[in-house]
Amino acid sequence: MKNCILSINLEDPIDFKYPKPSKSFIESLKKGNECVELREKPGILLANSYYKQGIKGALDKMFVRARVSRALEDALSFLPKEYGFIVFDAYRSKTTQKSLFESFSKQIAANHPHMSTEQLYAETRKFVAHPDESSRFRVPPHNSGGAIDLGLTIKDHPLEMGTSFDDLTSKAATNFFEEPYAPSSGLQETQWAEARKNRRILFNCMREAGFTNWKYEWWHFDMGNSLWSQELGLPWIYDSMNL
């Protein structure tokens, strides 16, 4: 399934081995560091989830680095014509980051009351970066403008991805559905197969455009930021956008 020449088939199994970026690609990240507003267009819907949820600090507009915006356009061009993206979140203020960390921690604690403080902290960090953990990230991924959360659509209708955005369970892991069907998952086998297919398409088109994925969240992709640099073993490029 592809509508242009790609190095992979969009329905290939998820593979977290990423090609090494070229020098010209790295230079394009450095040159494309200006902040730009994401705008709706054919194939790109903006959910702006946290603003609509009333999360503290969330903005009424969505922003990314210019090079990230262009890469999103590249990823869109790799999809069949009827497919598109729904963008849940992009740039995130530290105020929003803190609010989400506290909210997610409470949700996880409620679902896992026997977790120790250390276990709860570690589990929460899978799904949201702490806003002030400089030993891990001097700049949280979303605060840099180099992270984007998104899903797939067909004719503007969101597709089955196996979980909702911001699901805080093991099913949110990008390659969860690469395993054999598990009836205990609560999903029908057809849903399992559909989620696997759609996650592969999303992952592969974003990977082809130069993004890396945070493996605990099928929706989270990075470029030029701290998570991207860790995945590729390269220096990170994007500092805080401080909007």
Image (spheres, rainbow, N blue to C red):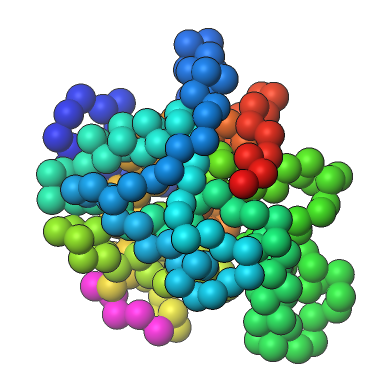
Percent across and percent down for residue 108 are 68, 79
Name the residue at 62% across, 46% down: 243
**Magenta stretch containing residue 187, yes or no?**
yes
Q: Nearer the viewer, residue 19 or 139?
A: 139
> Front-most of 49 and 176?
49
Q: In which quadrant of the rendered view does residue 30 lie?
A: top right
Q: Main secondary structure of the magenta part?
A: loop
Q: In percent of the image, x 84 and y 45: which residue is there?
A: 134
Q: What residue appears at the point 50 percent right and 75 percent down from the top-left corner?
A: 53
Q: Residue at x 79, y 68 (%)?
A: 121
- Classify 145 as above or below 126: above
* Magenta stretch holds residue 237: no
Instruction: Pinpoint residue 7: horizontal percent, then vertical percent.
Output: 30, 26
Q: Nearer the viewer, residue 88 or 114?
A: 88
Q: Determine if residue 212 is in view.
A: no
Residue 31 at x, y = what percent?
52, 18
**Image position of 140 (left or right of 74):** right
Quadrant in the picture for the N terminus: top left
Asked if one can make out residue 75 in the rendered structure from this viewpoint, the answer is yes
Quarter holding residue 228: top right
Q: Residue furthest top?
A: 23
Picture mark count: 0
The magenta segment is: 186-190
The percent coordinates of residue 71 (x first, y second) are: 39, 32
Query: Is 61 on the left-hand or right-hand side of 230?
Result: left
Please indicate whether residue 96 sits to the left or right of residue 88 in the image. right
